[in-house]
Image: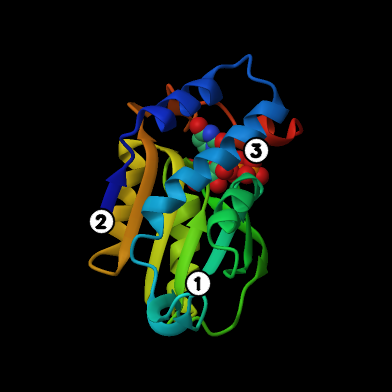
Amino acid sequence: MRLHVADHPLITHKITVLRDKNTPSPVFRQLTSELMTLLAYEATRNVRVEPCEIETPVTKTTGVKISDPRPLVVPILRAGLGMLDGMVTLIPTAEVGFLGMARDEVTFEPVTYAERLPEDLSDRQCFVLDPMLATGGSLGAAIEFLFRRGAQEVTAVCLLGSPEGVEAIRKQVDGRNVTLVLGALDERLNEKGYIVPGLGDAGDRLYGTV
Ligand code: PRP
Ligand code: URA
C-alpha cells in the first residue's frame, strides 16, 4: 500500500478550521469540498490517460485525454458525500457509485446499508472518499467490496487518519494495488474509537443531524 500524507500549508490551515468545534456546518461543508479538490490533485496523479490528436488555432498537436473505462468515484455515505463535489470539480467525467455504511458505535463494526455500484469493476480505477479513517473498519469493508467486484486499483482519500486505521488497511490490502491519501495523520484513537485530536463526528458536523 502506498501512503501519501499531505504536506501543504493551505491544507493544514483548512483542516485546522475544520477541527475547531465552533466552525458551523456551512463553513465545514465548504472547507471539506475545498480540501477534497486539493487532495484530488495528489490522488489522481496516476489517473489513466491516452494520447489524442487535437488542433489548436495554430497547428495540430498531440495531447492526452482520460481513458475509458472512466474512473469511478465512490463516496461512503453519509460523510463521504461532503467530498464528492470537490472531487468531481477536478475530474468531471468520472462516474459516481455509492456505498452507504454506518459504524456500530459499540463494536466499531461497519454495517453496509446501501450500495449502488456497477456490477463489473474490472479494469476500473476506483476512488473511495471518506473524511475519517478511524479503526479502518468502514474503509476496509469498502475496499474489499470494490475488489470483489473486480477492481484492480483503489485510491482512498480521507481528510484525517489514525495510525491504527492506516495499519489496519495496510494489513488488510496486503500487496494489492491500494493508495491512501490523507490530509493529516493524527495521533491516535480514543476509547470511543474517535480520532484524536480529530474533528468529532464528520457526518454530524457536515449535516448537523444524527
Ligand atoms: C464515520 C466516518 C467513517 C467511519 C470511520 O461514519 O465517516 O465512514 O465513521 O470509522 P471507522 O474507520 O472506525 O470505520 P459513520 O459510521 O459515523 O457514518 P456517517 O458517515 O453516516 O456519519
Ligand atoms: N467517525 C467520525 O466521524 N469521527 C471519528 O473521529 C471517528 C469515526
The residues bearing labels 2 and 3 have C-alpha atoms spaced at a distance of 27 Å
Task: Kindly check if marks 1 and 2 are in contact, taking CB atoms under 8 A apart as contact.
Answer: no
Residue tagged 3: 203
Residue tagged 2: 2
193, above or below 119, in the image = above
Asked whether, in this view, residue 20 is left or right of residue 150, the answer is: right
Task: State the mark number for residue 71.
Answer: 1
191, above or below 87, in the image = above
Q: Is residue 92 visible?
A: yes
Which residue is at the far front? 58
Residue 37 screen position, x and y as percent? 51, 47
Identify the residue at image location x=50%, y=72%: 71
The residues bearing labels 3 and 1 have C-alpha atoms spaced at a distance of 25 Å
Quadrant placement of the C terminus? top right
Q: Which amino acid, mark 2?
A: Arg
Which residue is at the far top? 22
Quadrant placement of the N terminus? bottom left
The secondary structure type at the circle numbered 3 is helix
The residues bearing labels 1 and 2 have C-alpha atoms spaced at a distance of 19 Å
